[in-house]
Image (spheres, rainbow, N blue to C red):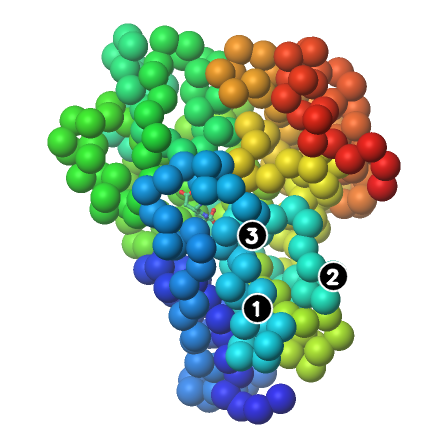
Amino acid sequence: MQLPFRLGSRGSPLALIQARSVASALCAAHSWSEDAVVIVPIRTSGDKNRHQALADIGGKALWTKELDIALTTGQIDAAVHSMKDVETFRPSHISIAAMLPREDVHDRLIGIPSLEVLPYSGCVGTASPRRAAQIRRIRPDIEIKLLRGNIDTRLEKLANKQFDATLLAAAGLIRLGRNDVGYDVPLDQMLPAAGQGAIGIEALADSAAWEKVSIIDHYPTHLAVQSERQLLLRLNADCHSPIAVFAEILEKNIRLRACLYTENGKFSASIDKEISQPSDAFEVGSLLLNQSPPEVQALFLPRVLSER
Ligand SMILES: NCc1[nH]cc(CCC(=O)O)c1CC(=O)O
């Protein structure tokens, strides 16, 4: 492998900050000099279609395809991702080599301090079916409008009163130095998306680069996010499905909480179980699906794979 070590990243401000923290962790762990790692920004399909709902752009791998190609063709040695944006099914030659310690997993409400004090029939901007469903479950009167874009765009639209509130992951705000923005929504009202708050680094399986990156792996984060992703796998779900899941590492076990919703949040199912290893989350997914009301099953079952 040639030096410097080439770290692929999306080019957004948040992605570049995340890539820099991976670069620092690599340099520290290997006692490399600062210029031993270069960040290679790569524009992904998701970056090219800023104004459409993610679910409407169609096609998977919105945030990963171009980085996967760069990895496969040897343009980069490793790729940095927000784990939340990494699809459930990955190409078999690409493997997660490490995750950084997880940041705060909460969603932040911006524009108003809590869901309870939103004005009657108010309007919340989000592009996330998971956030929309969880809001509508608590406040069925609220109208959801499509809102994508970076923090500044969203704050501007809030200031113009196009929305009463929007939601963003606390992790992104904190990393961008905007910890002052918004109010944490409690986990019992809004459970995060699989992988939220976790940064993952992928490399070609069995490569020298994979070995080099694996040194910085934060094992508890890796275990938790793997558990969350196993549950998604069972349901063949992704970040465009109204599904919330959060794994918490306890002393002996992993506490796994998950919720499925219909798009309008009217019907839902939830589960809270302790498991001993990430692969057990697959079975928890089955349990959750079995105990879901028919309206929820109707949404998830057509996607579920009949066999594994
Ligand atoms: N889908 C976009 C995305 N992917 C990761 C984050 C935030 C950082 C993280 O969760 O690690 C965000 C923005 C958001 O949801 O507010």
- Residue 195 screen position, x and y as percent: 57, 46
Q: Secondary structure at mark 2?
A: loop
Looking at the image, can residue 290 be seen? yes
- Residue 63 screen position, x and y as percent: 49, 54
Mark closest to the chain's N terminus, 3 or 2: 3
Q: Quadrant of the N terminus?
A: bottom right
Residue under pointer 2 = 92
What residue is drawn where x is 58% and y is 65%?
A: 68
Q: Is residue 127 above or below residue 249?
A: above
Could you tell me how far apart the alpha carbons at marks 1 and 3 are, in whole angstroms? Answer: 11 Å
Question: What residue type is disc 3 on?
Answer: Ala
Pick the residue in front: 247 or 285: 285
Pick the residue in front: 271 or 288: 288
Is 295 left or right of 191, judged from the image as shown? right
What residue is drawn where x is 72% and y is 66%?
A: 93
- Residue 150 screen position, x and y as percent: 30, 47
Residue under pointer 3 = 61
What residue is drawn where x is 62% and y is 25%?
A: 259
Residues at marks 1 and 3 touching, judged by CB atoms closer than 8 Å: no
What residue is drawn where x is 40% and y is 12%?
A: 139
Looking at the image, can residue 231 be seen? no
Residues at marks 3 and 2 touching, judged by CB atoms closer than 8 Å: no
Question: What residue type is disc 1 on?
Answer: Ile
Pick the residue in front: 59 or 294: 59
Could you tell me how far apart the alpha carbons at marks 3 and 2 are, in whole angstroms? Answer: 14 Å
Label 1 neighbourhood size at 10 Å, few (<14), some (14-19), many (20+)?
A: few
- Residue 232 screen position, x and y as percent: 68, 38
Residue under pointer 1 = 69
Mark closest to the chain's N terminus, 1 or 2: 1
Question: What residue type is disc 2 on?
Answer: Ser
Mark closest to the chain's N terminus, 1 or 3: 3
